[in-house]
Amino acid sequence: MRPGPQTTLAPETRTDPAPALSARAIRRIVLEQAKRANVGHIGSALCVADILAALYGSILRMAHPADPKRDCFILSKGHAALALYAALFLKGWLSREALDTYCADASLLGVHPDHALPGVDFSTGSLGHGLPMGAGVALGARLQRSSRRIFVLVSDAECNEGSLWEAVMFAAHHRLANLVAIVDLNGQQALGRTDAILALPGLEGRWQAFGWDAHVVDGHDGAAIERTIAGLDTRSGPPHVLIARTVFGKGVSFMERRLEWHYLPMSEAQYRQALAEVCGNR
Amino acid sequence: MRGAFATALIELAAADPRILLLTGDLGFMVLEPFAERFPERFFNAGVAEQNMIGLATGLARSGFIPFVYSIATFASMRPYEFIRNGPILHRLPVRIVGVGAGFEYGHAGPSHHGLEDIGIMRVQPGLTLIAPADHRQTRTALQKTWDLPGPIYLSLGKDDRTIVPGLDGRFELGRADLVHDGTDVLMLATGAIASEAVAAADALARHGVACAVMVVASLNPAPTDDLLGVLERFSVALTVEAHYVVGGLGSLVSETIAEHGLRCRLVRCGARTAPDGRSGSNAALSRAHGLSRDALVRTVLAALATVTV
């Protein structure tokens, strides 16, 4: 049985109609739900809020979750699922009631996303799976002569996985122009900085060397992300990658670039401060 | 069985455009007819089995029926977690074809010996697991399962000549086939080694031992009713598999006996030891692991001598 809502959630935020889809709205929901469920993985979810807001706000062509021709989004870095749930809620594909089951017993909204949730095509969480599956969807779309595009958000640490590079090679060889990878380059992995664990210098050049069309963007500049993706040729040519420079824990001063927010839940005081910083009503 | 697989797949693909074939850069002189007939539906994913399973998962999610082809070890163990988190978790119609199970790549050495595929695949719920005994049964199994909604693993031998006498190419999912009747002892066999079991049964007849042989090609779903029906008739039974005795048919039959409280002593014939670095022909390695006709005869006679009925 899941615990009841905690007093720290202002009741009006639970009954209002969904606010507009924005990075700030995603971050607010991330904080609210992480606090209510008393779980971690907050830093990763805050980090990708601007990317998800850009994707679900304007980039992804998707009117209905069941439309087989809609664009496909794969959150390969599944541990940022809370940000995805927030985006799906803000888009109107997930009810407030469902969102509030985050991390409850028997909820479809776990720490990592599951395909049983409408709008989520693939269960992810084990790193290195998203790009191979995304390449499969991209290949399938080509065979079906569909104009759907496939976006896969991977973490920088995920670039440690050999399977990712297998997919990178396949997609380049078959010139899957409808495949767009976005690397969340936050420099942080599970036990420390990527520089200290398995450094990824020149990541843009590495993807280019494998035959991809690579772009470096500010991962917190939604307009720049939208502009870059709008400029991609997704009908012919090589696959595309956006190396999105981000700040782990973005938007909450005491979480930014701090490893512990990969894991820890917030105290009451931390939650109040984080919410105030994200909502801007200090 | 490789040739039978390729031929049957071409026939099915001609009727259903959803069928695709992916290979991990293997299948020389086997897959060319498919590639030539359906160049748009054939993909060599390169030496990259994890990605190949991921691709197949994405393709199946998009409405295709992808078959992925490799040597049994590389088709099963190498991308195992991708199979689990892909077609199993998403319940998608990916067909994984592992060729040359057991010691069929004998001379290639232990890295190529497929002695675990059935064991590791059998633990995955929702995965249909089939190990045909000969090329005719391979064809029937493919024809009867190709459009199942869930994932399938096919453990295939290489040989397209040997026929298991009495099997006549029969296959039913969840059923086993009694191909040689007898009253003294029962052999249960899976995969290409089944022909050795039948040969052993013929040899045992000359020793005055009436040995029944049941071919178990459908390992998941397990042919529980057929196993129970035959096991209760015997006080001693042997499993025969070119596989480790742990995890495969030997384990399956042990579980069936234990869970149903049968009074049947089971002897598991198969590989029991870690590889010792020696390679050799399929026949030599089968002999070394007690799976040749003569070895099986000796094992049956020894088992009967120690069982008091």
Image: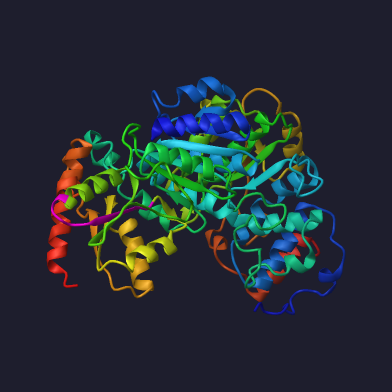
Q: Name which residue lies at 31% across and 44% down.
A: B114
Quarter of the image holding residue B230? bottom left
> Residue B207 lies in magenta, yes or no?
yes
Side of A182 relative to B53 (left or right):
right
> What range of the chain is rendered magenta?
B206-216
> Residue B109 lies in magenta, yes or no?
no
Side of A183 relative to B234 (left or right):
right
**Residue A136: where, in percent of width, then height?**
59, 37
Q: Could you say which is closer to the camera, residue A49 or residue A106?
A: A106
Q: Is residue A165 visible?
A: no
Quarter of the image holding residue B3? top left
Q: Could you say which is closer to the camera, residue A197 or residue B284?
A: B284
Vertical arrangement, residue B303 with respect to residue B201, above or below:
below
Q: Name which residue lies at 62% across and 57% down.
A: A114
Vertical arrangement, residue B212 with respect to residue B136, above or below:
below
Question: Which quarter of the rendering shows the N terminus of chain B?
Answer: top left
